[in-house]
Amino acid sequence: METATTIVQVRQKVSLARKEGKTIGFVPTMGALHEGHASLIRTARERDCFTVVSLFVNPKQFGPREDFHLYPRPLQADLRLCETAGAALAFHPSAEEIYPLGFQTSVEVEGLGEALCGRARPGHFRGVTTVVLKLFNQVLPDIAFFGQKDAQQALILRKMVRDLDVPVEMVICPTVRETDGLAMSSRNRYLSPLERERAPGIYQALLELKQEIVQGARDASELAGRLRQRLKAIPGAELDYADLMDTRTLAPVGRLQGEILAAVAVRFGSTRLIDNLLVQAP
Ligand code: PAF
């Protein structure tokens, strides 16, 4: 596996691969990689891509009181995981490379970034869209791979790509879970052993919601109410949000019909975990 730290290097290496007729696959990450990231890299490899992984903890998507400085940066372990999963190139630029002095542009998908995580993290999605569009322009991929775990992020990035005619195919891959159901996340490592034991209750609550829907429940506000009760009942958990909404607009739904997104965010101490399920109301 090759590595690059500058935009010039990454462009040179990608352009060589393209000249060899390869399709460029891209997995943007903030590092602290886990099996969820590995599965994105493997999916890109299965599509026969020259797979580029970026490792960049993007300061613009963290609020002033968030964990930017604490965010884990285990570069050597990350590079090993990239190589083992089949990446061809790891791009780990410095903050100055991405945001040189005088940088003052941002990209925002209006509306979609204000719901759900946007309420607790104002400006977060502006930071995400800005860095992802920059990374797309640096790497120039044909296909980009993201996880469904960050459902709102995936939706917003898809909209950005559509609205701005970005010539990148967006592939959203299923959430990868620990054996006890907890969605894999770089932030799981912040959990104490006791919190880690309790955190799978989030997925359990989502599965119970799904079960209710499969059995015929259709009233979104009643379903959301019971989902919130279940989440609040997890010892040590503090509910941020639990909502049922339209999968494309994130608008609240009344009676369930077709596919809906059930998305939740829960805090264990200072660790904020998110999860979601796409559920079909048959
Ligand atoms: O999902 C993430 O890890 C980040 O939000 C992303 C897409 C790499 C942008 O920094």
Image (cartoon, rainbow, N blue to C red):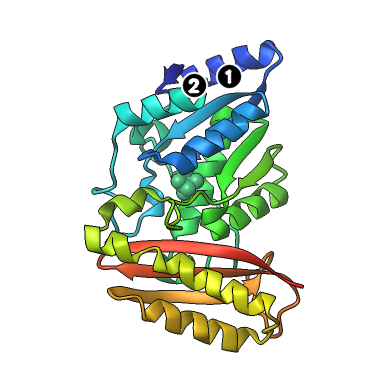
State the mark number for residue 24. Answer: none
Q: Residue at x 53, y 27 (%)?
A: 52
Quarter in which the C terminus is drawn = bottom right
Residue type at numbered disc 2: Leu
137 vs 172: above or below:
above
Q: Image check: 188 left or right of 181? A: left
User: Quick check: 145 above or below 125?
Assistant: above
- Give 135 or 266, whichever is nearer the viewer: 266
Q: Residue at x 44, y 62 (%)?
A: 274
Q: Which residue is pictured at 44% across the width and 27% down the height?
A: 82
The tag earlier along the polypeptide, 1 or 2, is: 1
Q: Which residue is mark 2?
A: 89
Which callout, 1 or 2, points to the residue nearer the camera? 2
The residue at label 1 has a CB less than 8 Å from ligand 1 = no
Please tell me whether mark 2 sits on a helix, a strand or a loop: strand
The image quarter containing residue 258 is: bottom right
Determine which of the numbered discs, if any, sits on residue 14 in the image.
1
At x 38%, y 38%, the residue is: 31
Query: Total number of numbered labels?
Result: 2
**Residue 54 point in image, percent of width and height:** 46, 32
Q: Amino acid at mark 1?
A: Val
Secondary element at tag 1:
helix
Do the residues bearing badges 1 and 2 touch, measured as CB atoms within 8 Å? yes
Q: Quadrant of residue 215?
A: bottom right
The answer, for residue 135, to whether it is visible in the render is no
Image spot of residue 60 (x, y percent): 39, 50
Mark 1: few/some/many CA within 10 Å (<14, 14-19, 20+): many
Count residues near mark 2 (Cα–Cα under 10 Å), then give few for <14, some for 14-19, many for 20+.
Answer: many
Could you tell me how far apart the alpha carbons at marks 1 and 2 are, in whole angstroms? Answer: 9 Å
Q: Is residue 229 above or below residue 238?
A: below
